[in-house]
Image (tube, rainbow, N blue to C red):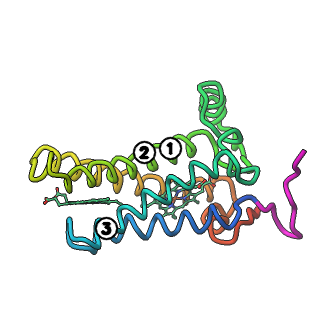
Amino acid sequence: MSTTPHTRDGVKVWDPFVRIFHWSLVSCVLLNYFVIEDGETIHQWIGYAASALVSLRIVWGFIGTRHARFADFFPTPARLRAHVLAMRSGQVESHAGHNPLGALMMLALMALVLGLGITGFMQTTDAFWGEEWLQDLHGVIGSALIALAGLHAAAAILMGRIERTNLVGAMITGVKRRG
Ligand code: HEM
Ligand code: HEM
């Protein structure tokens, strides 16, 4: 049985893999959306790197440390219902790992990144070269990802304030602290 390691002033929740994964993924997505020229070779490689990071994270969700595992936070209907009911009744639940709504968002963000990898790759094949609907679809998935990521970042900052826990800091240091 694994126990959550407590440090002097907090609980260690995110292992180095999760933290490096998160900020590398953020960099890839923001670079490809806002900085790099659409469709260039470097855009393709950064996009594949983002897909590779997500694929590795899925593997880590089965073999990783306690709070990195899907079993720890998978947003089942029962978990989601309990979480929403608790929020509605004004209770501030603190989850050691991801809360169920955060976990749902995480899965959506990762699915959209994989969607970009697939539609991006398809655009480079002879069969789909120059297909306008595919370019549009790729663009729509990219915009949806940026919109949800903005909501996700805002929710992380807001929930951190409500729970009085350094949620964003914990994604950097690995340690959740009450403060
Ligand atoms: C983090 C992942 C990615 C993001 C955020 C992203 C985002 C975008 C955006 C916003 C556009 C402009 C779409 C438009 O004009 O409506 C674009 C275009 C393009 N992307 Fe990506 N992309 C990603 C991954 C990939 C990958 C993996 C590939 C290919 C291997 C790829 C290939 C292309 C191509 C070829 C275009 C140009 C389409 C055109 O000619 O209009 N992208 N991407
Ligand atoms: C393109 C932008 C982003 C993407 C694609 C993204 C994606 C993700 C993913 C997939 C996770 C799950 C981490 C895991 O268990 O492996 C996560 C968690 C998290 N992200 Fe982001 N993220 C983005 C931007 C941000 C930004 C800008 C912030 C800071 C404000 C942020 C703060 C967090 C926090 C605090 C968590 C952990 C939430 C918790 O305590 O349950 N993210 N993000």
Q: Which residue is mark 1?
A: 107
The residue sitting at 20% across, 65% down in the picture is 39
The correct choice, above or below, for 168 with respect to 79 in the image is: below
Residue 2 among those drawn in magenta? yes
Horizontal side of 90 relative to 158 (left or right) equals right
What is the x, y in percent for residue 104? 53, 40
Would you identify the image quadrant in which residue 43 lies?
A: bottom left
Amino acid marked by disc 1: Leu
Q: Which residue is mark 2?
A: 111
Q: CA distance from mark 3 to mark 1?
A: 20 Å
Q: Is mark 1 within 8 Å of ligand 2?
A: no
**Residue in view at x 14 percent, y 51 percent:** 126
CB contact under 8 Å: marks 3 and 1: no
Give yes or no for contact between labels 2 and 1 (Cβ–Cβ under 8 Å).
Answer: yes
Tag 1 secondary structure: helix
Residue bearing mark 3? 32
Please name the amino acid that badge 2 sits on. Answer: Ala
**Circle nearer the N terminus (3, 1):** 3
